[in-house]
């Protein structure tokens, strides 16, 4: 089945490929897909914030344990 790309030329799409493309288009058109994408973006934002917090906490904990270790060696 012919399909027009963004640039304008027509290219042939196989039946399986066409079915997959239709499923993807329908997914992005549905409101459930929009909700799923929003939840995905929220999850990604939370993950980035958690990683940043853990990096800051990790370096703080590292210095604390090094301080405890050096004080124990001095005793």
Image (cartoon, rainbow, N blue to C red):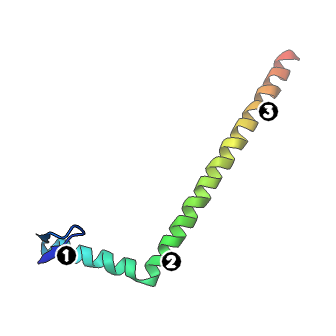
Mark 2 is surrounded, within 10 Å at the Cα level, by few (under 14), some (14 to 19) or many (20 or more) other residues, namely: few
Instruction: Choose top left, top right, bottom left or bottom right for residue 71.
Output: top right
Q: Secondary structure at mark 2?
A: helix
Q: Secondary structure at mark 3?
A: helix
Q: Is 53 left or right of 25, judged from the image as shown?
A: right
Mark 1 is surrounded, within 10 Å at the Cα level, by few (under 14), some (14 to 19) or many (20 or more) other residues, namely: some
Q: Is residue 74 above or below residue 64?
A: above
Please state the horizontal and vertical placement of residue 20, each as a whole percent of the image.
24, 73
> Looking at this view, is 72 or 12 the one in front?
12
Q: Nearer the viewer, mark 3 or mark 2?
A: 2
Tell me, for residue 68, which label it has, or none: none
Tell me, for residue 64, which label it has, or none: 3
Please state the horizontal and vertical placement of residue 32, each as a whole percent of the image.
46, 81
Q: CA distance from mark 2 to mark 1?
A: 25 Å
Of callouts 3 and 2, the N-terminal one:
2
Q: Is residue 48 above or below residue 3?
A: above
Q: Nearer the viewer, mark 3 or mark 1?
A: 1
Q: CA distance from mark 3 to mark 1?
A: 59 Å
> Looking at this view, is 51 or 4 the one in front?
4
Q: CA distance from mark 3 to mark 2?
A: 43 Å
Please state the horizontal and vertical placement of residue 74, each as a whole percent of the image.
86, 16
Residue located beneath label 1 in the image: 18
Q: Do labels 3 and 2 touch, CB within 8 Å?
A: no
Q: Secondary structure at mark 1?
A: helix
Q: Is residue 38 above or below residue 58?
A: below
Query: Residue lying furthest bottom in this view?
Result: 31
Tell me, for residue 35, which label it has, or none: 2
Instruction: Choose top left, top right, bottom left or bottom right for residue 24.
Output: bottom left
How many callouts does the rendering have?
Answer: 3
Of callouts 3 and 1, the N-terminal one:
1
């Amino acid at each position: 089945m012919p399909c027009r790309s963004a640039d304008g030329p027509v290219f042939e799409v196989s039946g399986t490929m066409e079915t997959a493309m239709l499923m993807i288009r329908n997914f992005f058109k549905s409101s459930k897909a929009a909700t799923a994408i929003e939840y995905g973006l929220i999850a990604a934002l939370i993950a980035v914030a958690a990683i940043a917090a853990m990096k800051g906490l990790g370096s703080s904990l590292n210095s604390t344990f090094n301080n405890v270790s050096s004080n124990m060696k001095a005793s």
